[in-house]
Image (cartoon, rainbow, N blue to C red):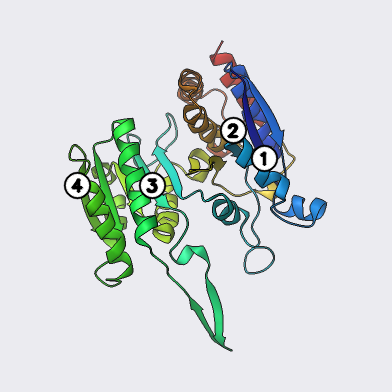
Amino acid sequence: MQHRITLIPGDGIGPEVASSVVRIIEAAGVDVAWETHYAGAQALEKFGETLPKELLDSITRNKVALKGPVTTPIGKGFTSVNVGLRKALDLYANLRPIRALPNVPCRYPELSLVIVRENTESLYAGLEHVVVPGVVESLKIITEKASTRIARFAFEYSRREGRKKITCGHKANIMKLSDGLFLDCFRNVAKEYPEIEADDKIIDNACMQLVMRPEQFDVMLLENLYGDIVSDLCAGLIGGLGLVPGANIGEKGAMFEAVHGSAPDIAGQGIANPTALLQSGILMLRHIGEREAADRTENALFKVFEEGRVLTRDIGGTARTAEFADAIIQQMR
C-alpha cells in the first residue's frame, strides 16, 4: 500500500540528511507519497509564520510526519517549532530509544534502553511571565490526566516490545504535590500490568546511576523537563545526539525527528551524518506497519557500522552523506 507522509526537511543540514533518508526508505521498498512542508525560519520567510496551517493540516490528514532538524533561536526570536508542533497536535509521548551502534567508541557498547517522556506539561511547557521587573515566574503544571496517559503509553509500549521493567524518575521528595501526582499515577497504572516490573528513583540519583550502571534500566518514564535532560544524557552514553532517534506520538498522529541541531556551520557541504534521522525513519516504518522494511533498513545500517568502511567524518570516517546512504542501500540489495 502507499503511505502519505508529511516531510519537513528542516534547515541547516536538514534538507541533506532528509533527502538521504527518503532515498533509503524508498530503496527499502516502501511506497511513499511525500508531502513536503516548511517550518521555522523558512516558513516564517515564506508564509509569515513558523507553523503554517498547511503544515499542521498535512500532518493531521496523514497522521505521520518525518522531520529534519529546525533551528530554535536561543533567548530571542520565535519559540521552539518542536514544542509548537507537539502542542498543536497533542503529541503527548516522546519516545527515545537509546541503543549503541557497532564500531562507535562509547562507554557502554551493549546499552539498550528507552526513554518515555511526557511532552505537554511541566516546566518545559514554557508557561512563564514577568511578575515585576527583575522577577520571572515559571509554572510547573502536572495533571492526573496527562500523567496517567503517559504512564499507560509506557506500559503498553513495554508490553508490545517485550520490555520487562519501567523506572519512573521524579523529585517527589521535594515537589511532593506535582512530582508526587506524577508518581502516584505511575503506580496506579502499574497495577494493570503485573508482568512488567515497576520501580522509581529520585531523578538526581537516577542520573548518577545512569552514569555508573546504566544496564539496570530498561524503560524510563519521565516528566517533560527531566525527560529532555536525561534523554540527551543517555545519548551521550552511546556516542551523541547524531546517532539516536526520536518520536513524538499522540492520538492525532505521530512525528519522527532527528533530535540533534541543524549544524549551520556544515550545512551545504554534504558531510552530515543522517543516522539519527534514519533511525527515526525506522521507528516511523514500524509505526505505520512496515516492520519488515524497518528491520531490513536497520540491519543494513548496523552492517555498514560493523564493517566501518563507509562512515561519515563525525564518527571517524571520510564518507560524504550521499556515500553513506549509498552504502546502506547497497547492503539491502
Q: Residue at x 63, y 62 (%)?
A: 79
User: Which of the numbered marks, if any, corresponds to residue 116?
Assistant: 3
- Residue occupying the point 56% across, 78% down: 129
Q: How many marks?
A: 4
**Of helix, strand and loop, which one carries label 4?**
loop
In the image, residue 312 sits, relative to residue 26, either above or below, namely below
Residue at the spot of label 1: 58
**Nearest-to-viewer mark from 3 and 4:** 4
User: Depth check: 151 or 82 in front?
Assistant: 151
Query: What residue is at 59 percent from the left and 24 percent from the top?
Result: 25
Residue 191 tag number: 4
Look at the picture and state if 327 lies above or below 156: above
Indicate the position of residue 44 as horizontal and vertical percent values. 76, 55
The residues bearing labels 1 and 3 have C-alpha atoms spaced at a distance of 26 Å
Determine crowd level at label 4: few under 14, some 14-19, many 20+ residues with C-alpha closer than 10 A: few
Q: In this rendering, would 8 be left or right of 87?
A: right
For the residues labelled 3 and 2, the Cα–Cα distance comes to 29 Å
Instruction: Identify the residue under disc 2.
Output: 312
Question: What residue is rendered at 62% in x and 29% in y?
Answer: 21
